Image (spheres, rainbow, N blue to C red):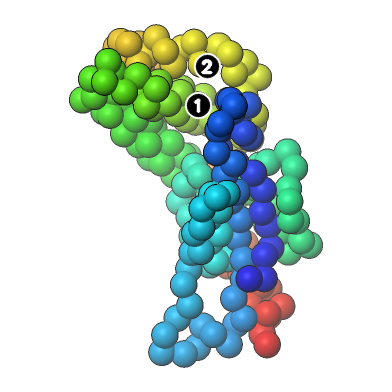
Amino acid sequence: MNVLLAGVVGSTAYGLAHEGSDIDVLGMFAVPTEELHGLHPPKESQVSTAPDRTFHEAGKAVRLMLSSNPTASELLWLESYDVRTPLADELIALRGSLLSERGVRDAYLGYAVQQLRKLQTRDPATMPGRAAKHARHLVRLLRQAEELHTTGRLTIRLPDPDQVRSLGERIAADPAHGESLLTRAQALFERPGVLPPAPDTAAADAWLRRVRRAFYI
């Protein structure tokens, strides 16, 4: 793969990792442009385990970022990278313009609702660890959504991981605590924020075309 950008994400990046936690690597790559012209397009994602690695082709990665997909978007906000190329620097410089108010609301709050539904339908006594993990995801997603809406920026590493763990345990035991957090976040998005109404698709398209030119071999 022509790797453009790669870094450790997930619990390690959030500061929530514990002994035995998986190491999750996320990245993007570019296929040789010639491969895009044939009858059989190349795979848009490459996934492997031990360690867990997910790499999206540049075109797919940008489409996910334009939809404010939380997992894909966080790749552009990491504190450090295993691989970072000049083309990746160009995309990182665009990261704020790839987001949108509606995209963040729909994606982040949408994923948070999914985590809450899992908690509401799961018996926490049967798999307490899994329930707490869903609850931590809920807290993180809502915090990130609120930060993006009010500042236009995303902080990946949590400043208070112990507090998030504790809150996760409370929500896992009583999902009603999660409902109140979700209601607060939804109310916040009823007020004006700093994100643009739509992402800058022209800038994203121009970047992807530069990638295609760079790998026209």
**Residue 12 in view:** yes
- Kind of residue indicated by mark 2: Val
**Residue 180 in view:** no
Foreground of the two, 141 or 190: 141
- Kind of residue indicated by mark 1: Arg
The image's mark for residue 164 is 2
Q: Quadrant of the C terminus?
A: bottom right
**Whole-percent x and y of residue 121?**
21, 25
The picture quadrant where one finds residue 122 is top left
**Whole-percent x and y of residue 83?**
74, 56
Q: Is residue 86 above or below residue 163?
A: below
Going 63% across and 26% down the picture, which residue do you hit?
Answer: 15
Q: In whole angstroms, how far apart are the C-alphas of marks 2 and 1?
A: 8 Å
Foreground of the two, 107 or 131: 131
Q: Secondary structure at mark 1?
A: helix
The picture quadrant where one finds residue 202 is bottom right
Q: Are marks 2 and 1 in contact (CB under 8 Å)?
A: yes
- Density class for disc 2 (Cα within 10 Å; few <14, some 14-19, many ≥20) is some
Q: Is residue 43 above or below residue 201?
A: below
